[in-house]
Amino acid sequence: MSPAVPAAAQPAPAGRPAPDPHPVPHPSDARTILDRCDELAAVSSTHHGITRVYLSPEHARVNALAAGWMTAAGMTTWQDAAGNQRGRYEAAEPGAPAILLGSHLDTVPDAGRYDGILGVLLAIAVVERLHRAGTRLPVAVEVAAFGDEEGTRFGTALLGSRALAGTWDDAWWQLVDEAGTTLRDAFTAFGLDPAAVGDAAPPRGSVVGYLEAHIEQGPYLLEADRALAVVSSIAGARRFELTMTGVAGHAGGVPFHRRHDALAGASEVVLAVERLARDADCVATVGRLEAFPGGVNVIPGLVEFSLDLRGEHDDRRDEVWAAVREAAAEVGERRGLAFAAHETHSAPAVVASPALRDVVRDGIAATGDTDPMVLFSKAGHDAMAVAELTDWAMLFVRCGNGGISHHPDEIVTLADVAVALDAFEASVRALAERSR
Ligand code: HGY
Ligand code: MN
Ligand code: MN
């Protein structure tokens, strides 16, 4: 891999602004980012591991930490009407449109410490560099630390970024968490006014584009021995809560031919999900499954399970869903079970805007990787929601440990964070120049 050379040390390619003649790239910028990842990782609702959900006390604490770092980077800060932590680094001309940078601070259960977090901190670090150099760009730079990308608490994902994009759906107010708290009640308990959620969206035309840096959450950069990639598109995702209903009974007394075993039936559906998705080049996961009543000597009469289904193309993904429903109906028919499904989340596949992809590609090239890798993201990101508001592009950063993510073993290297920061800074500067 070509050695990463800081953007500032590169001669300015023709047509692009010369980088600051006396850059002050703090060798510790990447170290500071990783130290902040560790600081945020300590904010969890669990004693072991990292779990941080939307509108929780932990969410409030990481917003406060991010606000402090944003302020130190010369930004004005506010918590928006949906609980996202926002910051703005003013342009040379106050009130100018802004480049929006962002990612999320919430996590899955027992998460890694870089998913979303690294993107927020890289964004703040880019602004810190501008502030330190006394640079004012022709556009402002705003950072959004989104409060709910994962959907861990209420099942529906991208709530924070959808509020910012202006695509909030009032039907979501009735969503409930495991404790039975509605999203509406959680809003008010967090100090937010549900009626004002629309205020999270910036005025139309005030955002020139959205750039998000994020860990790859896969093995491809690692296998290619590359640190960075530009994202081509993001898979469209649908999530469901499924039930298989049979008849509970005595584990000894009921002969097989008389059983309506909900768990045996659900198990056949789980395997059909895997087969049908794989055959269609989609991805599908049953992440949660619970059998009731749950006695070791009781035939399960009810199974509740989840389905996360994604595809590069929405129509192909939807065909898989139709085939899963068909397979489940056949299992139900044969075993005397009832299958039901309730959709909890849907987000269409989105394609990065060519112009912003070029900006990210140029940013990577400015670090010495002159032929940046391009990756399709099967992981979902806030960019899927922000795509409703403005053009977007993403920068991927290599994951170590085989690319593992949504797992405590998620890891990145100091060197990759350093080169990602240089690339992200160069991308922001290039987009600012294009936005003149
Ligand atoms: O599920 C995803 O792909 C993302 O991490 N929310
Ligand atoms: Mn995630
Ligand atoms: Mn993420």
Image (tube, rainbow, N blue to C red):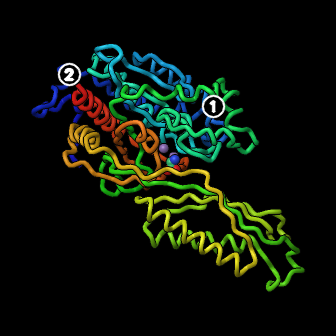
Secondary structure found at label 1: helix
Q: Residue at x 61, y 51 (%)?
A: 344
Indicate the amino acid at tag 1. Glu
Indicate the amino acid at tag 2. Asp
* Disc 2: CA contacts within 10 A as few (<14), some (14-19) or many (>=20): few
* Mark 2 to mark 1 CA distance (whole Å): 39 Å
Secondary structure found at label 2: loop
- Look at mark 1 in the image and give the residue it sits on: 58
The outermost residue toward the left is 14
Q: In which quarter of the image is residue 172?
A: top right
Checking the image for residue 355, the label placed there is none
Q: Quadrant of the C terminus?
A: top left
Q: How many discs mark residues in the rendered view?
A: 2
In the image, residue 81 above or below residue 251: above
Q: Is residue 62 visible in this depiction of the protein?
A: no
Residue 429 pos. (x, y %): 26, 28
Q: Which residue is drawn at 65% across and 43% down?
A: 154
Residue 191 pos. (x, y %): 66, 23
Residue 20 pos. (x, y %): 20, 22
Residue 263 pos. (x, y %): 73, 70
Q: Which of 273 and 81 is in front in this view?
A: 81
In the image, residue 233 above or below residue 280: above
From the viewer's perspective, tell me whether residue 228 is left or right of residue 402: left
* Disc 1: CA contacts within 10 A as few (<14), some (14-19) or many (>=20): many
- Look at mark 2 in the image and give the residue it sits on: 20
Q: Is residue 221 visible in this depiction of the protein?
A: yes
